């Protein structure tokens, strides 16, 4: 019964956080954000997921906390935490995923490479000068992670794509592009979906192996 309550608790915390973002309840949003990834990490361990997956999610938690701290230094440290999480994911994909064959490997790879190049080129002029190279490098690692997620099937592929979208929304804000209403809601909605799908895909792949 306790194991069954864990996903409900994680879902409830995510719902409260997203609701707080929509309604402008900033203190609630700030208080709930740091607990989201630890709850997901606990759940994947209960399901028998690899410990490295929990590490990847906890690095996401560190990134979440640093990004909401504010300031350029905290942003760079947060981006570094997420980058370390992506490296964990790449290791997990290599160990537990299956390698796509032939054109199913080459075509998505070319698409992801083109998407990174186009996005970086469009964002570059609007980004603060000191952040241009770090953001481009992080974007490349994120794109590699999203491509690697294809090895874990449809759930992983969807999670990787959502992660690209979520971080693309953050980068568009840095570049001062026009934003949709409640931009943090959309960033967190896609981010939470990405982490949940990636975690589920890795757990399924690891247990299947």
Image (cartoon, rainbow, N blue to C red):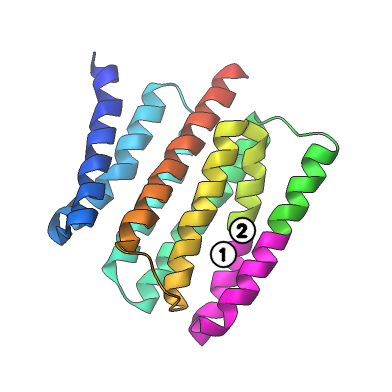
Q: Name the residue under label 2.
A: 141
Q: Vertically, is 190 above or below 94?
A: below
Is there any visible trace of residue 135 in the rendered image? yes
Q: Which residue lies furthest to the top in this view?
A: 1
**Quarter of the image that includes the C terminus:** top right
Please state the horizontal and vertical placement of residue 130, each as a whole percent of the image: 51, 84
Please state the horizontal and vertical placement of residue 82, each as a whole percent of the image: 47, 56
Q: Is disc 1 surrounded by few (<14), some (14 to 19) or many (20+) residues within 10 Å?
A: some
Residues under numbered marks 2 and 1 in contact, where contact means CB atoms less than 8 Å apart: yes
Between residue 112 and residue 31, name the one nearer to us: 112
Judge left or right: residue 142 versus residue 177: right
Query: Does residue 53 belong to the magenta stretch?
Result: no
Between residue 13 and residue 85, name the one nearer to us: 13
**Quarter of the image that includes the N terminus:** top left
Q: Vertically, is 18 above or below 92?
A: below
Q: Mark 1 points at which residue?
A: 138
Judge left or right: residue 53 versus residue 146: left
User: Magenta region, mostly helix, strand or loop?
Assistant: helix
Quick one: SS at disc 1? Answer: helix
Is there any visible trace of residue 55 in the rendered image? no
Residue sitting at x 29%, y 64%: 68
Judge left or right: residue 25 versus residue 134: left
Q: Is disc 2 surrounded by few (<14), some (14 to 19) or many (20+) residues within 10 Å?
A: some
Residue 173 numbered tag: none
Residue sitting at x 37%, y 48%: 189
Residue range corresponding to the magenta coloring: 114-141
Please state the horizontal and vertical placement of residue 47, each as a whole percent of the image: 41, 21
Quick one: SS at disc 2? Answer: helix
């Amino acid at each position: 019964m306790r194991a069954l309550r864990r996903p409900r608790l994680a879902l409830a915390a995510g719902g409260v956080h997203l609701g707080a973002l929509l309604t402008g309840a900033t203190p609630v949003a700030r208080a709930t954000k740091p607990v989201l990834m630890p709850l997901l990490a606990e759940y994947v361990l209960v399901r028998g997921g690899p410990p490295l997956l929990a590490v990847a999610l906890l690095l996401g938690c560190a990134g979440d906390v640093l990004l909401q701290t504010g300031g350029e230094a905290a942003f760079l440290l947060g981006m570094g935490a997420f980058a370390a999480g992506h490296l964990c994911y790449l290791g997990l994909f290599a160990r537990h995923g299956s390698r796509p064959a032939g054109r199913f490997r080459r075509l998505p790879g070319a698409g992801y490479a083109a998407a990174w190049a186009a996005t970086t080129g469009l964002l570059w002029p609007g980004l603060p000068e000191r952040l241009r190279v770090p953001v481009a490098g992080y974007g490349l690692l994120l794109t590699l992670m999203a491509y690697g997620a294809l090895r874990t099937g449809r759930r992983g592929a969807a999670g990787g794509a959502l992660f690209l979208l979520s971080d693309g929304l953050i980068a568009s804000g840095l570049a001062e592009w026009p934003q949709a209403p409640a931009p943090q809601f959309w960033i967190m909605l896609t981010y939470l979906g990405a982490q949940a799908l990636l975690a589920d895909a890795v757990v399924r792949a690891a247990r299947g192996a």
